[in-house]
Amino acid sequence: MKRFITDTILCSLFIFGIMGAFASLTFLKIFDAFDPIGEMFSDFELTDIVFSQLQDDPIADERIVIVNIGEIPREGIARQIEIINKYNPKVIGLDVMLDAPKEWPEDSALTRVLSETPNIIIGEKLINYNEELGEFETTIKPEDHIVQESALGYVNMITDARTQEDLKMCREFTPYEMVAGETRYSFPVRLAYAYDSAMTEKFLARGNDLEVVNYKGNIISFSSAQYGMKYFALDVYDVIDENFTEDLFKDKIVIMCFLGKYIGDTETTEDFYFTPMNENYVGKAKNDMFGGVVHANIVSQILDDEPIDQMSEKAQIALAIFFCLFNVFLFKIIYGAMPRWYDGITKIFQLIEVAGLATLMIYLLLVFNYKADFTLSMIVIALSGDSLEVYHGVVKNLFSKERRKEVFKINRRFWEYQ
Protein backbone atom coordinates (compact mmCIF):
# COMPACT_ATOMS: atom_id res chain seq x y z
CA MET A 1 0.00 0.00 0.00
CA LYS A 2 2.87 2.34 0.82
CA ARG A 3 4.30 1.83 -2.68
CA PHE A 4 0.83 2.45 -4.14
CA ILE A 5 0.52 5.79 -2.31
CA THR A 6 4.05 6.80 -3.34
CA ASP A 7 3.23 6.01 -6.97
CA THR A 8 0.05 8.08 -6.70
CA ILE A 9 1.98 11.10 -5.42
CA LEU A 10 4.78 10.75 -8.00
CA CYS A 11 2.30 10.39 -10.86
CA SER A 12 0.46 13.50 -9.62
CA LEU A 13 3.73 15.42 -9.63
CA PHE A 14 4.33 14.16 -13.16
CA ILE A 15 0.94 15.52 -14.27
CA PHE A 16 1.68 18.95 -12.79
CA GLY A 17 5.06 18.82 -14.51
CA ILE A 18 3.35 18.28 -17.86
CA MET A 19 1.03 21.21 -17.12
CA GLY A 20 4.02 23.39 -16.28
CA ALA A 21 5.75 22.46 -19.53
CA PHE A 22 2.66 23.31 -21.60
CA ALA A 23 2.24 26.57 -19.68
CA SER A 24 5.82 27.53 -20.53
CA LEU A 25 5.26 26.84 -24.22
CA THR A 26 2.04 28.87 -24.11
CA PHE A 27 3.81 31.75 -22.38
CA LEU A 28 6.48 31.78 -25.08
CA LYS A 29 3.71 31.79 -27.73
CA ILE A 30 5.56 29.15 -29.74
CA PHE A 31 2.41 27.68 -31.30
CA ASP A 32 0.32 30.84 -31.65
CA ALA A 33 0.59 30.90 -35.45
CA PHE A 34 -0.82 27.36 -35.61
CA ASP A 35 -3.64 27.88 -33.12
CA PRO A 36 -6.54 29.83 -34.66
CA ILE A 37 -9.05 27.93 -32.50
CA GLY A 38 -7.16 28.82 -29.32
CA GLU A 39 -7.09 32.45 -30.45
CA MET A 40 -10.84 32.38 -31.01
CA PHE A 41 -11.46 31.07 -27.48
CA SER A 42 -8.84 33.30 -25.81
CA ASP A 43 -11.39 35.93 -24.75
CA PHE A 44 -14.00 33.39 -23.60
CA GLU A 45 -14.84 32.24 -20.08
CA LEU A 46 -17.38 29.54 -19.34
CA THR A 47 -19.26 31.85 -16.98
CA ASP A 48 -19.89 34.28 -19.87
CA ILE A 49 -22.83 32.03 -20.71
CA VAL A 50 -24.55 33.17 -17.51
CA PHE A 51 -24.44 36.84 -18.50
CA SER A 52 -25.24 36.33 -22.18
CA GLN A 53 -27.81 33.52 -22.11
CA LEU A 54 -29.16 32.53 -18.71
CA GLN A 55 -30.09 35.71 -16.84
CA ASP A 56 -33.68 36.82 -16.40
CA ASP A 57 -34.76 39.90 -18.34
CA PRO A 58 -33.50 42.89 -16.36
CA ILE A 59 -35.74 45.24 -14.43
CA ALA A 60 -35.10 48.81 -15.57
CA ASP A 61 -32.95 50.73 -13.08
CA GLU A 62 -34.88 53.96 -12.66
CA ARG A 63 -32.17 55.46 -10.45
CA ILE A 64 -29.83 55.94 -13.41
CA VAL A 65 -30.23 57.95 -16.63
CA ILE A 66 -27.52 57.94 -19.29
CA VAL A 67 -26.98 60.92 -21.58
CA ASN A 68 -25.02 60.82 -24.83
CA ILE A 69 -22.59 63.69 -25.32
CA GLY A 70 -21.77 62.52 -28.85
CA GLU A 71 -19.25 64.79 -30.54
CA ILE A 72 -20.64 68.14 -29.44
CA PRO A 73 -18.15 70.81 -28.29
CA ARG A 74 -17.70 71.81 -24.66
CA GLU A 75 -20.22 74.58 -25.05
CA GLY A 76 -22.79 71.91 -25.94
CA ILE A 77 -21.81 69.78 -22.93
CA ALA A 78 -22.16 72.88 -20.75
CA ARG A 79 -25.63 73.44 -22.15
CA GLN A 80 -26.60 69.82 -21.44
CA ILE A 81 -25.41 70.09 -17.82
CA GLU A 82 -27.24 73.38 -17.39
CA ILE A 83 -30.52 71.83 -18.59
CA ILE A 84 -30.12 68.63 -16.55
CA ASN A 85 -29.29 70.59 -13.41
CA LYS A 86 -32.61 72.49 -13.68
CA TYR A 87 -34.43 69.22 -12.92
CA ASN A 88 -32.56 68.51 -9.65
CA PRO A 89 -30.62 65.29 -10.21
CA LYS A 90 -29.00 63.67 -7.18
CA VAL A 91 -25.58 63.58 -8.86
CA ILE A 92 -24.17 64.08 -12.36
CA GLY A 93 -21.22 62.07 -13.65
CA LEU A 94 -19.25 63.51 -16.57
CA ASP A 95 -17.24 60.73 -18.23
CA VAL A 96 -15.14 62.78 -20.61
CA MET A 97 -11.51 63.88 -20.62
CA LEU A 98 -11.19 67.65 -20.15
CA ASP A 99 -7.39 67.76 -19.95
CA ALA A 100 -6.72 69.61 -23.21
CA PRO A 101 -7.47 73.35 -23.08
CA LYS A 102 -9.87 74.72 -25.70
CA GLU A 103 -10.68 78.17 -27.02
CA TRP A 104 -11.89 80.58 -24.33
CA PRO A 105 -15.59 80.63 -25.36
CA GLU A 106 -15.79 76.83 -25.03
CA ASP A 107 -13.88 76.58 -21.75
CA SER A 108 -15.50 79.62 -20.19
CA ALA A 109 -19.03 78.27 -20.70
CA LEU A 110 -18.13 74.87 -19.22
CA THR A 111 -16.16 76.43 -16.35
CA ARG A 112 -19.12 78.60 -15.41
CA VAL A 113 -21.61 75.73 -15.48
CA LEU A 114 -19.36 73.40 -13.48
CA SER A 115 -18.87 76.09 -10.83
CA GLU A 116 -22.67 76.23 -10.48
CA THR A 117 -22.98 72.42 -10.25
CA PRO A 118 -21.63 71.19 -6.90
CA ASN A 119 -23.14 67.70 -7.32
CA ILE A 120 -20.94 66.65 -10.26
CA ILE A 121 -18.24 63.95 -10.57
CA ILE A 122 -15.73 64.39 -13.39
CA GLY A 123 -13.63 61.64 -14.94
CA GLU A 124 -9.86 61.41 -14.72
CA LYS A 125 -7.42 58.77 -16.02
CA LEU A 126 -4.67 57.12 -13.99
CA ILE A 127 -1.36 56.61 -15.84
CA ASN A 128 2.19 55.29 -15.34
CA TYR A 129 1.61 52.30 -13.07
CA ASN A 130 4.64 51.46 -10.91
CA GLU A 131 4.64 47.70 -10.32
CA GLU A 132 7.28 47.87 -7.57
CA LEU A 133 5.26 50.35 -5.53
CA GLY A 134 1.88 48.96 -6.60
CA GLU A 135 0.52 52.39 -7.44
CA PHE A 136 0.09 54.90 -10.26
CA GLU A 137 2.49 57.80 -10.49
CA THR A 138 0.08 60.43 -11.76
CA THR A 139 -3.24 61.14 -13.47
CA ILE A 140 -4.59 62.82 -16.57
CA LYS A 141 -7.19 65.15 -15.16
CA PRO A 142 -9.13 68.22 -16.27
CA GLU A 143 -7.58 71.65 -16.20
CA ASP A 144 -7.70 73.09 -12.67
CA HIS A 145 -9.45 76.26 -13.80
CA ILE A 146 -12.23 74.13 -15.32
CA VAL A 147 -12.99 71.68 -12.51
CA GLN A 148 -12.21 73.98 -9.56
CA GLU A 149 -13.81 72.20 -6.57
CA SER A 150 -15.49 69.37 -8.52
CA ALA A 151 -14.88 65.80 -7.31
CA LEU A 152 -12.90 63.45 -9.55
CA GLY A 153 -13.21 59.70 -10.17
CA TYR A 154 -10.98 57.64 -12.42
CA VAL A 155 -12.54 56.03 -15.49
CA ASN A 156 -9.83 53.43 -16.25
CA MET A 157 -11.15 50.12 -17.59
CA ILE A 158 -9.32 46.82 -17.09
CA THR A 159 -8.68 45.26 -20.53
CA ASP A 160 -5.77 43.69 -22.41
CA ALA A 161 -6.19 46.14 -25.27
CA ARG A 162 -3.36 48.48 -26.18
CA THR A 163 -5.37 50.65 -28.57
CA GLN A 164 -9.03 51.54 -28.99
CA GLU A 165 -9.17 49.31 -32.08
CA ASP A 166 -8.03 46.19 -30.19
CA LEU A 167 -10.47 43.77 -28.59
CA LYS A 168 -11.40 45.42 -25.28
CA MET A 169 -12.88 42.74 -23.02
CA CYS A 170 -14.00 44.22 -19.69
CA ARG A 171 -14.87 41.81 -16.85
CA GLU A 172 -13.41 43.40 -13.73
CA PHE A 173 -12.79 46.78 -12.13
CA THR A 174 -10.85 48.25 -9.23
CA PRO A 175 -12.91 50.24 -6.69
CA TYR A 176 -9.88 52.27 -5.66
CA GLU A 177 -6.23 52.77 -6.55
CA MET A 178 -3.21 54.44 -5.00
CA VAL A 179 -1.75 57.45 -6.80
CA ALA A 180 1.50 58.81 -5.36
CA GLY A 181 0.51 57.64 -1.88
CA GLU A 182 -3.05 58.96 -2.10
CA THR A 183 -6.21 56.82 -2.43
CA ARG A 184 -8.31 57.60 -5.49
CA TYR A 185 -11.79 56.14 -6.04
CA SER A 186 -13.26 55.01 -9.31
CA PHE A 187 -15.88 56.99 -11.20
CA PRO A 188 -18.78 54.57 -10.48
CA VAL A 189 -17.82 54.28 -6.80
CA ARG A 190 -17.92 58.08 -6.53
CA LEU A 191 -21.37 58.17 -8.16
CA ALA A 192 -22.72 55.40 -5.92
CA TYR A 193 -21.36 57.14 -2.82
CA ALA A 194 -23.03 60.42 -3.76
CA TYR A 195 -26.34 58.56 -4.14
CA ASP A 196 -26.14 56.19 -1.14
CA SER A 197 -23.07 56.47 1.06
CA ALA A 198 -24.10 53.62 3.39
CA MET A 199 -24.38 51.02 0.61
CA THR A 200 -21.14 52.21 -0.95
CA GLU A 201 -19.26 51.98 2.33
CA LYS A 202 -20.60 48.44 2.78
CA PHE A 203 -19.28 47.56 -0.66
CA LEU A 204 -15.86 49.10 0.03
CA ALA A 205 -15.69 47.28 3.38
CA ARG A 206 -15.22 44.06 1.40
CA GLY A 207 -11.66 45.28 1.00
CA ASN A 208 -11.16 43.74 -2.45
CA ASP A 209 -8.60 45.35 -4.75
CA LEU A 210 -10.36 43.76 -7.71
CA GLU A 211 -14.09 43.16 -8.24
CA VAL A 212 -16.04 41.34 -10.96
CA VAL A 213 -18.60 43.47 -12.80
CA ASN A 214 -22.06 42.01 -12.24
CA TYR A 215 -23.52 42.86 -15.64
CA LYS A 216 -27.30 43.16 -15.76
CA GLY A 217 -28.12 45.04 -18.94
CA ASN A 218 -27.49 47.64 -21.61
CA ILE A 219 -29.21 50.67 -23.08
CA ILE A 220 -30.14 49.01 -26.38
CA SER A 221 -28.89 45.87 -28.12
CA PHE A 222 -25.39 46.22 -29.59
CA SER A 223 -24.94 42.56 -30.63
CA SER A 224 -25.53 41.77 -26.97
CA ALA A 225 -27.80 39.17 -25.44
CA GLN A 226 -31.47 39.56 -26.29
CA TYR A 227 -32.48 41.15 -23.01
CA GLY A 228 -34.71 44.11 -22.39
CA MET A 229 -33.36 47.60 -21.80
CA LYS A 230 -31.81 48.10 -18.35
CA TYR A 231 -30.93 51.80 -18.54
CA PHE A 232 -32.84 54.69 -20.06
CA ALA A 233 -30.69 56.80 -22.38
CA LEU A 234 -31.16 60.16 -24.05
CA ASP A 235 -29.38 61.20 -27.22
CA VAL A 236 -27.51 64.48 -27.60
CA TYR A 237 -30.35 66.68 -28.81
CA ASP A 238 -33.03 64.99 -26.71
CA VAL A 239 -31.48 66.88 -23.80
CA ILE A 240 -30.73 70.13 -25.60
CA ASP A 241 -34.29 70.22 -26.98
CA GLU A 242 -35.63 69.11 -23.58
CA ASN A 243 -37.42 66.19 -25.18
CA PHE A 244 -38.20 64.38 -21.90
CA THR A 245 -40.61 64.47 -18.98
CA GLU A 246 -39.93 66.84 -16.09
CA ASP A 247 -39.44 64.06 -13.54
CA LEU A 248 -36.87 62.10 -15.57
CA PHE A 249 -33.78 63.54 -13.84
CA LYS A 250 -35.17 64.36 -10.38
CA ASP A 251 -33.09 62.69 -7.66
CA LYS A 252 -31.40 60.44 -10.23
CA ILE A 253 -27.82 59.52 -11.08
CA VAL A 254 -27.11 61.05 -14.48
CA ILE A 255 -24.13 59.65 -16.39
CA MET A 256 -23.00 61.84 -19.28
CA CYS A 257 -20.76 59.90 -21.63
CA PHE A 258 -19.94 59.00 -25.22
CA LEU A 259 -22.47 56.61 -26.77
CA GLY A 260 -21.35 57.11 -30.36
CA LYS A 261 -22.15 59.95 -32.71
CA TYR A 262 -25.76 58.98 -32.04
CA ILE A 263 -27.38 56.22 -29.99
CA GLY A 264 -27.21 53.13 -32.19
CA ASP A 265 -23.85 54.00 -33.78
CA THR A 266 -21.94 50.70 -34.00
CA GLU A 267 -19.16 51.90 -36.31
CA THR A 268 -17.19 53.64 -33.59
CA THR A 269 -14.56 51.91 -31.46
CA GLU A 270 -14.01 54.79 -29.03
CA ASP A 271 -14.82 53.81 -25.45
CA PHE A 272 -16.74 50.79 -26.81
CA TYR A 273 -16.13 47.43 -25.11
CA PHE A 274 -16.78 43.72 -25.28
CA THR A 275 -18.49 42.36 -22.19
CA PRO A 276 -19.64 38.90 -21.05
CA MET A 277 -23.14 39.96 -22.18
CA ASN A 278 -22.08 39.73 -25.82
CA GLU A 279 -24.30 37.21 -27.56
CA ASN A 280 -21.34 35.99 -29.63
CA TYR A 281 -19.39 34.88 -26.58
CA VAL A 282 -16.91 32.90 -28.72
CA GLY A 283 -15.01 34.67 -31.50
CA LYS A 284 -16.64 38.02 -30.79
CA ALA A 285 -17.10 40.27 -33.82
CA LYS A 286 -18.81 43.40 -32.49
CA ASN A 287 -18.45 45.48 -29.37
CA ASP A 288 -21.56 45.57 -27.22
CA MET A 289 -21.30 48.17 -24.43
CA PHE A 290 -19.98 51.72 -24.06
CA GLY A 291 -17.83 52.66 -21.09
CA GLY A 292 -20.51 54.83 -19.50
CA VAL A 293 -22.92 51.88 -19.48
CA VAL A 294 -20.26 49.67 -17.87
CA HIS A 295 -20.03 52.31 -15.13
CA ALA A 296 -23.82 52.21 -14.78
CA ASN A 297 -23.73 48.41 -14.26
CA ILE A 298 -21.10 48.86 -11.53
CA VAL A 299 -23.19 51.55 -9.80
CA SER A 300 -26.22 49.23 -9.90
CA GLN A 301 -24.38 46.32 -8.33
CA ILE A 302 -23.09 48.55 -5.52
CA LEU A 303 -26.50 50.06 -4.74
CA ASP A 304 -28.27 46.67 -5.05
CA ASP A 305 -25.70 44.98 -2.81
CA GLU A 306 -25.02 42.34 -5.46
CA PRO A 307 -21.25 41.92 -5.59
CA ILE A 308 -19.70 38.80 -7.09
CA ASP A 309 -17.35 36.80 -4.89
CA GLN A 310 -14.43 35.06 -6.56
CA MET A 311 -12.63 31.82 -5.79
CA SER A 312 -9.09 32.50 -4.58
CA GLU A 313 -6.03 31.15 -6.39
CA LYS A 314 -5.14 29.08 -3.33
CA ALA A 315 -8.56 27.39 -3.45
CA GLN A 316 -8.13 26.71 -7.18
CA ILE A 317 -4.75 25.05 -6.60
CA ALA A 318 -5.99 23.07 -3.60
CA LEU A 319 -8.93 21.69 -5.60
CA ALA A 320 -6.66 20.80 -8.51
CA ILE A 321 -4.33 18.87 -6.19
CA PHE A 322 -7.31 17.04 -4.66
CA PHE A 323 -8.75 16.02 -8.04
CA CYS A 324 -5.32 14.96 -9.27
CA LEU A 325 -4.62 12.71 -6.27
CA PHE A 326 -8.17 11.34 -6.28
CA ASN A 327 -8.18 10.53 -10.00
CA VAL A 328 -4.70 9.01 -10.01
CA PHE A 329 -5.56 6.88 -6.96
CA LEU A 330 -8.80 5.65 -8.54
CA PHE A 331 -7.34 5.18 -12.02
CA LYS A 332 -4.41 3.17 -10.65
CA ILE A 333 -6.89 0.76 -9.09
CA ILE A 334 -8.69 0.41 -12.45
CA TYR A 335 -5.33 0.13 -14.26
CA GLY A 336 -4.30 -2.79 -12.08
CA ALA A 337 -7.65 -4.53 -11.57
CA MET A 338 -9.36 -3.99 -14.95
CA PRO A 339 -6.64 -3.23 -17.56
CA ARG A 340 -8.84 -4.13 -20.56
CA TRP A 341 -11.52 -1.69 -19.41
CA TYR A 342 -9.14 1.09 -18.37
CA ASP A 343 -9.47 3.44 -21.36
CA GLY A 344 -13.25 3.26 -21.60
CA ILE A 345 -13.99 3.59 -17.88
CA THR A 346 -11.52 6.42 -17.26
CA LYS A 347 -12.69 8.46 -20.27
CA ILE A 348 -16.33 8.21 -19.17
CA PHE A 349 -15.37 9.19 -15.63
CA GLN A 350 -13.35 12.16 -16.88
CA LEU A 351 -16.24 13.39 -19.04
CA ILE A 352 -18.64 13.18 -16.09
CA GLU A 353 -16.22 15.10 -13.85
CA VAL A 354 -15.54 17.89 -16.36
CA ALA A 355 -19.22 18.28 -17.25
CA GLY A 356 -20.14 18.33 -13.57
CA LEU A 357 -17.59 21.02 -12.72
CA ALA A 358 -18.61 23.14 -15.72
CA THR A 359 -22.26 22.93 -14.69
CA LEU A 360 -21.36 23.79 -11.09
CA MET A 361 -19.42 26.90 -12.21
CA ILE A 362 -22.47 28.18 -14.09
CA TYR A 363 -24.89 27.31 -11.26
CA LEU A 364 -22.81 29.02 -8.54
CA LEU A 365 -22.60 32.27 -10.50
CA LEU A 366 -26.23 32.24 -11.60
CA VAL A 367 -27.72 31.45 -8.17
CA PHE A 368 -25.17 32.61 -5.59
CA ASN A 369 -23.16 35.33 -7.39
CA TYR A 370 -20.04 33.24 -6.77
CA LYS A 371 -17.49 32.99 -9.58
CA ALA A 372 -15.75 29.67 -9.12
CA ASP A 373 -12.84 28.78 -11.38
CA PHE A 374 -12.35 25.04 -11.86
CA THR A 375 -10.21 25.44 -14.99
CA LEU A 376 -7.07 24.07 -13.34
CA SER A 377 -9.02 21.12 -11.91
CA MET A 378 -10.56 20.34 -15.30
CA ILE A 379 -7.12 20.37 -16.96
CA VAL A 380 -5.82 17.99 -14.30
CA ILE A 381 -8.80 15.69 -14.82
CA ALA A 382 -8.35 15.73 -18.60
CA LEU A 383 -4.66 14.80 -18.29
CA SER A 384 -4.91 12.24 -15.50
CA GLY A 385 -5.99 9.16 -17.50
CA ASP A 386 -3.42 9.27 -20.30
CA SER A 387 -0.68 10.68 -18.05
CA LEU A 388 -1.01 7.67 -15.76
CA GLU A 389 -0.37 5.37 -18.71
CA VAL A 390 2.66 7.43 -19.77
CA TYR A 391 3.94 7.36 -16.19
CA HIS A 392 3.68 3.57 -15.98
CA GLY A 393 4.71 2.86 -19.58
CA VAL A 394 7.62 5.30 -19.90
CA VAL A 395 8.64 7.13 -16.71
CA LYS A 396 8.78 4.09 -14.40
CA ASN A 397 10.50 1.99 -17.07
CA LEU A 398 13.25 4.59 -17.44
CA PHE A 399 14.25 3.91 -13.84
CA SER A 400 14.47 0.15 -14.40
CA LYS A 401 17.70 -1.21 -15.88
CA GLU A 402 16.00 -4.29 -17.31
CA ARG A 403 13.16 -2.30 -18.84
CA ARG A 404 15.59 0.17 -20.44
CA LYS A 405 17.30 -2.73 -22.21
CA GLU A 406 13.98 -3.69 -23.79
CA VAL A 407 14.01 -0.43 -25.76
CA PHE A 408 16.98 -1.69 -27.77
CA LYS A 409 15.64 -5.21 -28.21
CA ILE A 410 13.41 -5.68 -31.23
CA ASN A 411 11.22 -8.74 -31.51
CA ARG A 412 12.08 -9.78 -35.07
CA ARG A 413 9.14 -12.22 -35.19
CA PHE A 414 6.66 -9.45 -34.40
CA TRP A 415 4.93 -9.67 -37.77
CA GLU A 416 4.27 -13.38 -37.37
CA TYR A 417 1.76 -12.62 -34.62
CA GLN A 418 -0.17 -10.01 -36.63
Image: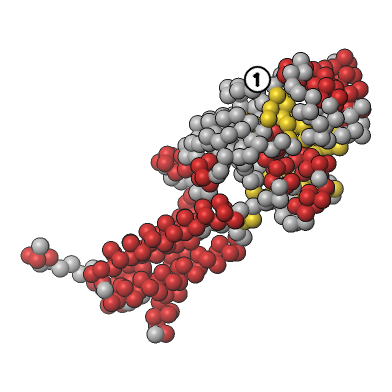
Q: Give how far across and how far down residue 86 sits, in percent.
A: 86, 24
Q: Is residue 136 visible?
A: no
- Give the quarter of the image for residue 249: top right
- Give the quarter of the image for residue 187: top right
> Between 176 and 235, which is closer to the camera in this rendering?
235
Task: Give the structural element (helix, strand or loop) at label 1.
Answer: loop
**Amino acid of disc 1:** Tyr
Residue at image location 63% in from the left, 31% down from the top: 219
Q: How many marks?
A: 1
Could you tell whether 94 is left or right of 372 in the image?
A: right
Q: Give how far across and how far down residue 134 sits, in percent.
A: 75, 51
> Between 392 and 88, which is closer to the camera in this rendering?
88
Which residue sits furthest bottom? 1
Residue at image location 47% in from the left, 39% down from the top: 282
> Which image quadrant: the C terminus?
bottom left
Per the image, the residue denoted by label 1 is 262
Could you tell whether 85 is left or right of 322 in the image?
A: right
> Between 127 and 116, which is closer to the camera in this rendering?
116
Its colouring scheme is secondary structure
Which residue sits furthest left? 416
- Give the quarter of the image for residue 415: bottom left
> Which image quadrant: the N terminus?
bottom left
Could you tell whether 191 is left or right of 310 in the image?
A: right
Residue at image location 90% in from the left, 19% down from the top: 108
Depicted 211 relative to depicted 338: above or below: above
Q: Is residue 355 visible?
A: yes
Residue at image location 61% in from the left, 53% down from the top: 369
Q: Give how far across and how far down residue 50 sits, in percent.
A: 53, 46
| Mark 1: few/some/many CA within 10 Å (<14, 14-19, 20+) | some
Q: Give how far across and how far down residue 279 sits, in percent.
A: 50, 36
> Between 131 and 276, which is closer to the camera in this rendering?
276
